[in-house]
Amino acid sequence: MSKKKFGSFKNLSEMTYLEKLLKLFVSTFAISAVAFGGGFVVLPMMRRTYVENLRWIDDADMQNYIAIAQSSPGTIAGNTAMVIGFKIAGVLGAVVCAFASVLPPFLIITAAFYLYNAIISMEIVRQIMYGMQAGVSAVILDFVVKMISDTALGKSKIFAIVLMCAAFIASFFFSFSVIYIILVAVVIGIAFLYSKLYCNKKKGKTEEEKIGKAPDIKMLSYDSLMKKAPKKGMGK
């Protein structure tokens, strides 16, 4: 039997704790090393790595982790990496992902600091930066479209779509702070959840009352047969 290569593991139950940590470090380091353009460029690469390729988490989990990372202090890329690391390998996994996400930028920025004056005046470097900006915009757009499609599909998603549109209008047209938008969205989401639970509970009580008032046809027919049986026996 041929042995599985380490990179082919997709089932967490087949991996040791050390293998999980090593895979988290290598994956996060590779993503951080090539993700130029900010945190929102890292997120689609994380989704492709952990959701589509490794299949360690699903889309719903990824959206929840992004929401947690966005509402927490720090960079969204580093926070998301730490949340995923914590999900996979606990506290040590979060520490490993944090270190792996910070190490490549630290090395690149340190090198760029010493080479800045030599490369900034080169025309080819400027053209590369323009090309990277176009690529980054396309990657972010692709990620946003996938998140919107995941949010819009399924049952009872009208509320999520309306809330998403309202948050976009508040941010884009009225320049509200992202922090306030997230806090208001959280409050509205909690209120919607409790109202939905209350309606379901009330609906359940109504159905129970209807069932309790309905006549038991089987019992009535059984009682009527029992009443008739003795009379026939006495007639004989």
Image: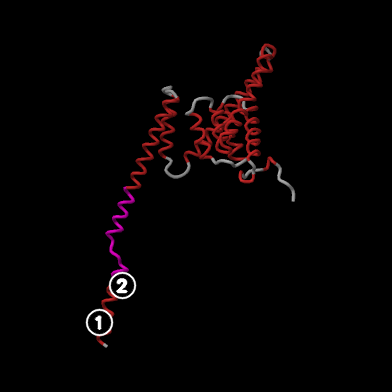
Q: Is residue 176 left or right of residue 47?
A: left
Instruction: Kindly check if marks 2 and 1 are in contact, taking CB atoms under 8 A apart as contact.
Output: no
In space, the residues marked 2 and 1 are separated at their CA atoms by 15 Å
Identify the residue at image location x=28%, y=80%: 229
Tell me residue 205's x, y (percent). Answer: 31, 51
Boundaries of the magenta span: 202-221
Tell me residue 37's x, y (percent). Answer: 59, 24
SS under mark 1: helix
Tell me residue 228's x, y (percent). Answer: 26, 78
Dot 1 corresponds to which residue?
Answer: 231
Q: Quick one: 164 or 34, which is closer to the camera?
A: 34
Amino acid on which disc 1 is placed: Lys
Q: Residue 222 bears which disc, if any?
A: 2
Identify the residue at image location x=30%, y=52%: 206
Q: Is residue 26 above or below residue 12?
A: above
* Predominant secondary structure, magenta span: helix
Mark 1 is surrounded, within 10 Å at the Cα level, by few (under 14), some (14 to 19) or many (20 or more) other residues, namely few
